[in-house]
Amino acid sequence: MTQNQNNAQSNVNLSSRHLGMRYWGKVEVIEEATTHRINRIEIKPKHGIKPQIHYHRSEHWIIVSGTAKVICGNEELLLNRNESTYVPAATFHRVENPGSIPLVILEIQNGEYLGEDDTERPYELNLVKSVTGSE
């Protein structure tokens, strides 16, 4: 194995899978590295993730089971198992589960920065504006 391959291997973390529970379902980090992260997202029936935007990463969503209603920019899609969509950086997006079974998505995040502080949500921006009085 070359030095570059060793460095690439050491930047990928496969062993520390962690699970995040949310009111709408759960997120499991499957793989994490400096410039990418792979998540397994499960969304409960009739629930969804609030609209959000990331400036430093894009996302690719692959539907594993269930049906996803995706809003990406001005486009609305209904995706079924084995279908996918791409969410470019700096694009408002959301996903919800209109169905009666759990929606399972594989999410591949790719970008120079993957921190959660790169996530903005419109309702948070409106709350800050109303509290500070700024436009």
Image (tube, grey):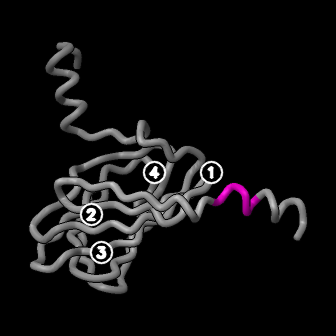
Res 26 → quadrant = bottom left
Res 82 → quadrant = bottom left
Mark 4 = which residue? 89
Cα distance in 3D space between marks 1 and 4: 17 Å
Give whichever of discs 2 and 4 has the lower sequence position.
Answer: 2
Give whichever of discs 2 and 1 has the lower sequence position.
Answer: 1
Quick one: 23 or 78, which is closer to the camera? 23
Q: Position of residue 128 (x, y in %)?
A: 22, 23
Quick one: 119 or 85, which is closer to the camera? 119
Give whichever of discs 1 and 3 has the lower sequence position.
Answer: 1
Q: Residues within 10 Å of mark 1 (few under 14, many from 20)?
A: some
Mark 2 = which residue? 75
The disc at residue 104 is 3
Q: Above or below — where is 82 with respect to 14?
A: below
Cα distance in 3D space between marks 2 and 1: 30 Å
Location of the N terminus (image quadrant): bottom right
The residue sitting at 35% across, 46% down in the picture is 53
